[in-house]
Amino acid sequence: MRVPMGVLGSLVSGMGLGAGLMYLTDPRSGRRRRAVVHDKARHAMHETEEAAGVVVRDIVHRSRGFVFETKGRMRREEVDDRTIEARIRSALGRVCSHTHAIQVDVHQGRVQLDGAVLAAEYPKILSRIAHVRGVLDVTDNLQVFQQPGSHPELQGGAIRPGDRPEFLQCNWSPAARFVAGLGGASLLTWGLQRGGVGGLGSVLLGSLITLRSITNIALTNLTGMGGRRLAIDVHKNIIVHAPVKEVFGFWRAMENFPRFMSHVEEVRTSGQDRSHWRVRGPAGTVFEWDAIITRLIPHQVLAWKSVEGSTVEHAGIIHFAPSNDGRSTRLDIRMSYHPPVGALGHVFARLLGADPKKQMDDDLTRLKSLIETGKAPREQMSPSTPERTGPRPLH
């Protein structure tokens, strides 16, 4: 007997609704579960409102900038030479990797260029300067070299590709992400409705574009094909009201990490430079890897990374800087990791409520409380992490 798809879909939906009601109305845990759902819904609403505000402000600012730029090009403005030179310097920074090697002289809107440039950048430099508002004429006295060679002013730096279109850049603006998200969702919806090979291609393309707009991560990293470059980077700064010796000692004893890192279950050290990590991932998954200390300057720098071949590529570096009075410590913390399936693993983790950047904020709050008071705030602890109290942290 063949069951119609409509009836089967209604049956599955009814079963899901019933299971959800049983989960929320359970006599023992239903009240807490409803409170958690309510809090997560409010948090999602606040994040949505904040994201919408950022997109609206970005669109408004871009629109105003476009209007003023158009007005400026339509009318002939009187601009002094110093302003034109500043505009030229700003333009050079976008297309030239050795701006200090170019001398700019402006007299009544007429520009004279002297110095040395690389051949790969030469056409872009002239084109860019010619389009600077206020420039009437350009006299080119530049010396063009194919390679830096023995010219000291051309050493170092990197050849710039020039202005790239918005959607070819690594980081998209809020407005670009919004537009791309709408386009990706439209392709995804159209592909689901159409079906077939064309619909499948549309679904795949729409999914990639939508995920790219949500995460703002390049597709090479999003799919895990970005070579050895780590996909997720988290950078935070925090000030802890404790001497740098004490703060450094707390971080140096890596066994302390589970005390404030909610996703770290255990860190076991073996020897001076090696440690074994056990980390809890989304949906109850557990990852384990070994790490080694790569840089250690007492009271200044601590850096580590996972050993080659680990399931999760992970690295971290912390810079310690004491305050002027020596009573506080400023921490500059950078952590990076590459999930097992690229940044897509990061996306799925976010959908399941495990946002690495948000976790880092909560973890640093616990760290600050642990070092300053000797215990972590109860409201910041995760439900599965017992409160740890006691004397000052283990060093």
Image (cartoon, rainbow, N blue to C red):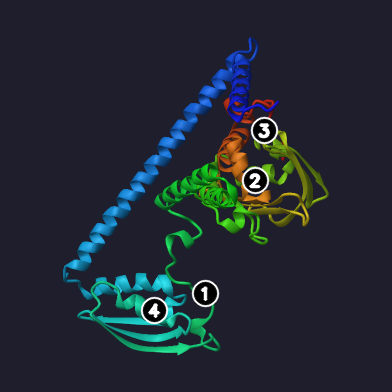
Closest to the camera, between mark 4 and mark 3, is 4
Disc 2 versus disc 3: distance between alpha carbons?
36 Å
Closest to the camera, between mark 2 and mark 1, is 2
Earlier residue among tags 2 and 3: 2
According to the picture, the residue beneath numbered tag 4 turns out to be 125
- Contact flag, marks 3 and 1 (Cβ < 8 Å): no
Earlier residue among tags 1 and 4: 4
Earlier residue among tags 2 and 4: 4
Amino acid of disc 1: Gly
Residue 313 picture location, percent across and down? 71, 52
- How dense is the environment of label 2, judged by Cα within 10 Å: few (below 14), some, or many (20 and up)? some
Task: Please tell me whether mark 3 sits on a helix, a strand or a loop.
Answer: loop
Earlier residue among tags 3 and 1: 1
Task: Please tell me whether mark 2 sits on a helix, a strand or a loop.
Answer: helix
Q: Is residue 254 above or below residue 379?
A: below
According to the picture, the residue beneath numbered tag 3 turns out to be 392
Q: Is residue 211 left or right of residue 165?
A: right
Q: Is residue 88 left or right of residue 257?
A: left
Q: Is residue 342 above or below residue 70?
A: above
Q: Is residue 116 above or below residue 281?
A: below
Q: Quadrant of residue 62?
A: bottom left
Q: Is residue 382 visible?
A: yes
Amino acid of disc 2: Gly
Task: Please tell me whether mark 1 sits on a helix, a strand or a loop.
Answer: loop
According to the picture, the residue beneath numbered tag 1 turns out to be 157
Q: Is residue 319 visible?
A: no
According to the picture, the residue beneath numbered tag 2 turns out to be 345
